[in-house]
């Protein structure tokens, strides 16, 4: 075993069907008296339900969270928190809403309670993102790490099946890259393999019945583990490509992860054989990139960048951007190989090592 460093993040996890009912007690546990509830416009009803549960402890609802945390929305939410005298924030929804909670925490230090309803994993990371003038900047700051996470699988029963599949593969991507991270360790590797297994195993029953609560619980458990890996170790080529495609070409987050992952894994396969063996084992296959592609295909997920909004004319610029800044990755970044990878992902061709 190689020497390693591992820092556990001190988030309190409350897990199980119906745990949203404990929201008031969790606010109290944090010492909160006036909680601002955040959501997207589409999940306003859920935010209102939280405010109702909180009663006198609710300061108000801000239901304008949007993808990639536009700085204008972050400023409006910060102003609202200040105006209402909020002393804590509840972010109920997917990664976009969690991201807005983090933007408030970054500025004010207010504690965040996250109540995730997708499998994005942001709720257990200290990574934040803010988009200003079309550019998304990300960073890490301990202040933004949610203090408490309430994982109530009942809240994910409404997640549309298509989003369920891509969001679960988004989670798998965190663990897959975590398995070859230069700063990985035996603890994150255990979390990663189990997270991949749990997310993948939940999909067949969810295809049959999206309201299968046991499968929803398994997927959310997997998402928690995968998010923990994301928050603990450095990500590589796959996340860099997805960040570039999302940030510069406005591609949808979870779908982009789904299309890119088999190709990014194939790119790194020869340089990270042990990680590939663990990913394949967790997916019950023998070849990691192929097993991820099959998972997407079997569950009707997109497998072509062309189908999720990337024009062929943008491939050169995407390859330039992905190769521009150096970052740790098992295989060195070669612009020509990255351009070929993106072409295959664009056309929906099989991944090539
Ligand atoms: P999202 O939060 O944008 O949600 C997508 C849509 O689904 C939204 O309209 C939302 O209201 C809706 N939705 C969410 N849960 C639902 C449910 N249970 N039922 C019905 N509708 C529901 O998507 P996401 O994939 O969760 O998050 C993506 C964002 O999170 C990206 O901006 C990404 O960069 C960020 N992210 C950040 C981190 C981090 O560590 N900082 C990690 C992962 C993702």
Image: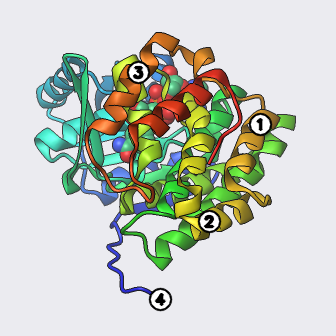
Position of residue 79 relative to residue 53, above or below, is above
Mark 4 or mark 2, earlier in chain: 4
Q: CA distance from mark 4 to mark 1?
A: 42 Å
Q: Is ligand 1 less than 8 Å from the beta carbon at label 3? A: no
Q: Nearer the viewer, residue 15 or 95?
A: 95
Residue position for label 2:
193
Distance from Cα at disc 3 to Cα at disc 2: 34 Å
Distance between mark 3 and mark 1 Cα atoms: 42 Å
Return the residue at label 4.
1
Write down the quadrant of residue 247 in the picture.
top left
- What colour scheme was applied to this rendering of the protein? rainbow
Q: Residue at x 63, y 34 (%)?
A: 166
Q: Give 56 or 96, whichever is nearer the viewer.
A: 96
Dot in front, 4 or 3? 3
In the image, which disc is placed on residue 211?
Answer: 1
Dot 3 or dot 1, earlier in sequence: 1
């Amino acid at each position: 075993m190689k020497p390693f460093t591992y820092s556990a993040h001190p988030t309190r996890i409350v897990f199980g069907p119906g745990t949203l009912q404990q929201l008031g007690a969790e606010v109290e546990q944090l010492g909160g008296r006036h909680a601002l509830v955040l959501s997207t416009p589409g999940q306003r009803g859920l935010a209102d339900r939280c405010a109702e549960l909180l009663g006198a402890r609710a300061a108000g609802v801000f239901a304008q969270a949007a993808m990639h945390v536009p700085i204008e929305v972050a400023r409006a939410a910060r102003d609202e928190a200040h105006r209402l005298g909020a002393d804590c924030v509840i972010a109920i929804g997917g990664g976009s809403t969690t991201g807005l909670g983090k933007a408030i925490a970054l500025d004010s230090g207010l504690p965040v309670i996250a109540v995730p309803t997708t499998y994005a994993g942001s709720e257990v990371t200290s990574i934040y993102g803010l988009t200003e003038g079309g550019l998304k900047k990300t960073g890490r700051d301990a202040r933004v790490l949610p203090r408490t996470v309430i994982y109530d699988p009942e809240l994910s029963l409404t997640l549309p099946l298509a989003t369920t599949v891509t969001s679960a593969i988004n989670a798998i991507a965190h663990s897959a890259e975590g398995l070859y991270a230069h700063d990985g360790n035996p603890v994150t590797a255990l979390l990663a393999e189990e997270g991949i297994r749990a997310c993948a195993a939940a999909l067949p029953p969810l295809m049959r019945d999206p309201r299968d609560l046991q499968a929803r619980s398994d997927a959310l458990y997997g998402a928690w583990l995968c998010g923990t890996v994301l928050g603990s170790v450095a990500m590589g080529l796959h996340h860099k490509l997805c960040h570039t495609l999302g940030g510069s070409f406005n591609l949808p987050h979870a779908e982009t992860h789904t299309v890119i992952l088999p190709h990014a894994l194939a790119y790194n396969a020869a340089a990270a054989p042990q990680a590939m063996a663990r990913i394949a084992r967790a997916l019950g296959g023998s070849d990691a990139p192929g097993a991820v592609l099959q998972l997407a295909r079997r569950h009707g997920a997109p497998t072509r960048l062309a189908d999720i909004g990337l024009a062929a004319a943008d491939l050169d610029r995407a390859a330039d951007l992905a190769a521009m800044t150096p970052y740790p990755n098992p295989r060195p970044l070669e612009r020509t190989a990255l351009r070929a990878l993106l072409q295959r992902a664009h056309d929906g061709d099989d991944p090539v090592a």
